[in-house]
Amino acid sequence: MEYLIEKINLSKKYKSDCIVIGIFEKYQLSYIADILNKISDNYILKILKNNNFKGKINQIIMLYEVPNILIKKILIIGCGMKEKFNREKNKIIIKKVINQIKAINIKDVFWCLTDLIIKNINIYWNIRDTIKIIEENIYTFDKFKKIKKYTLSIIKFNINNNNIQKSQKAIIHAKAINIGMIKTKNLANLPPNICNPEYLSLKTYKLSKKYKKNISVKIIDETEMKNLGMNAYLAVGNGSKNKSIMSVIKYDNLFDHSQPIILIGKGLTFDSGGISLKPSLNMDEMKYDMCGAACIYGVINFISKLKLPLKIIGIIAACENMPDSNSFRPGDIIKTMSGKTVEVINTDAEGRLVLCDVLTYINQFNPSIVIDIATLTGACVVALGNNISGFMSNNLDLSKNIIKASLDVDDRVWELPINDKNYYNELKSDIADIRNTGNSNAGGAITAACFLSKFTKKYKWAHIDIAGTAWNYNENNKAFASGRPVNMLCQFLLNYSNYNN
């Protein structure tokens, strides 16, 4: 998709198929709508009144061959009450417009909805939001389809001279984030017979070749994991023919001795539950248990595209949890890389076993911040549903910064508590240092994070549980990766690097 800035000149003939404008209730016209109406000798307003178009939110109408207007199609969207127009309503109308544009196969659009004034939102965020919503609604995963779907190709934003610089920055940022989102979704949507741990390692290797000035990759195979004592990580993958592989991606655009930010992604390329086998219903969705890893891959693409002045280590912790005679079992006791022993109660609580060894492994890098992203618990879905990711942290400032980034981009998170000893008591074992699940079914998302926190004492750490937000469903109730929380993490890094608007 190409996004351009062009101040509209209504005396000029454009190649654009369509111009999009907004109208509020009580026939309050936006700036461009008012100009178009005057050029048309009040034709537009007459048509709207004749068709009972009152500007209510999401009312939509297409006008053709309007007198004195050189662009052949004018798409008009109702924006509701002017004084109540906000960011949320703006997102609603953008989605409606894009779906209409897709339905009638328009490929080149002059977009004038950025003229609308949104409370507490400047032009930078207006354009960021617009591009994000457009891209979400035109995305298709058709790699395995013979017939490819139509795609919108050009959006021209009508921007006045005072806002050109901010608008250009917004487009640059939005396009880089969208690259990360698309990379994440494309990777996550792959079937598990293609996207296995080795495939993920090859993708990271290719990334290092593309951005070889700033990125290097180290692949940790099972032999090295064994030598390191990463027994918990290895136990999870023991039942699979696909070997466990950890990819350590180092991005450095500082080249000094500053401490890195470390981003860790859970990469279970398929999670059957192991011996504690999952029900067959919707088990196909367990290919999405690597969405945390896909997210890291997307974020690394983003920072590489923008060349952010940061030092980042991204870790893709990939393996596959399958039932087999070699599989780890309920009742097993495993010694982790940290030296702590874990009593396995449920082999379907495997992600924390992978992550605990990775959280120990990264001590060697002396990180400034560590964030892990994981489709970790069904309990998080029960607690927060499919719209908000759960997160927990051992550092107040880090929590505040993550929450700010989530609100900046409306990729929301909700902080859950991990500072109550009662949650830790749930993990007590009579025969090992810790259990891999709580003694009860209560507070499962929290006890999982408490488990991880046992391995994060030496650095600032946050855990983001995306079990409810990593994928959503289309109109046919088919699951597709959402790309979350790439947007939020990208914004966190923009804020952290002072590279934002």
Image (tube, rainbow, N blue to C red):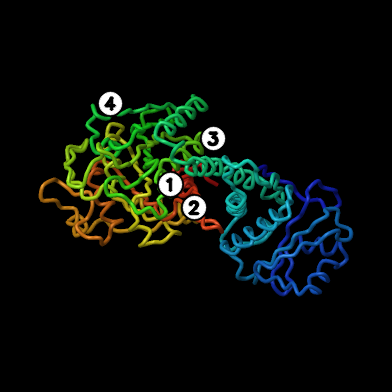
Q: Which is more N-terminal, label 3 or label 4?
A: 4
- CA distance for labels 1 and 4: 27 Å
Q: Confirm or deny contact between disc 2 and disc 1 (CB under 8 A).
A: yes
Contact between labelled residues 3 and 4, with CB atoms less than 8 Å apart: no
Observer-nearest of 296 and 279:
279
Figure check: 72 above or below 358: below
Residue under circle 1? 288
Q: Residues within 10 Å of mark 3 (few under 14, many from 20)?
A: some
Residue type, mark 2 in image: Ala
Labelled pair 3, 1 in contact (Cβ < 8 Å): no
* Residue at (72% x, 64% y) in the render: 30
Q: In this view of the protein, which residue sits in the foreground, 431 or 97?
A: 431
Q: Which residue is mark 2?
A: 479
Closer to the chain start, of discs 2 and 1, is: 1
Q: SS for tag 1? A: helix
Left or right: 82 in relation to 120? right
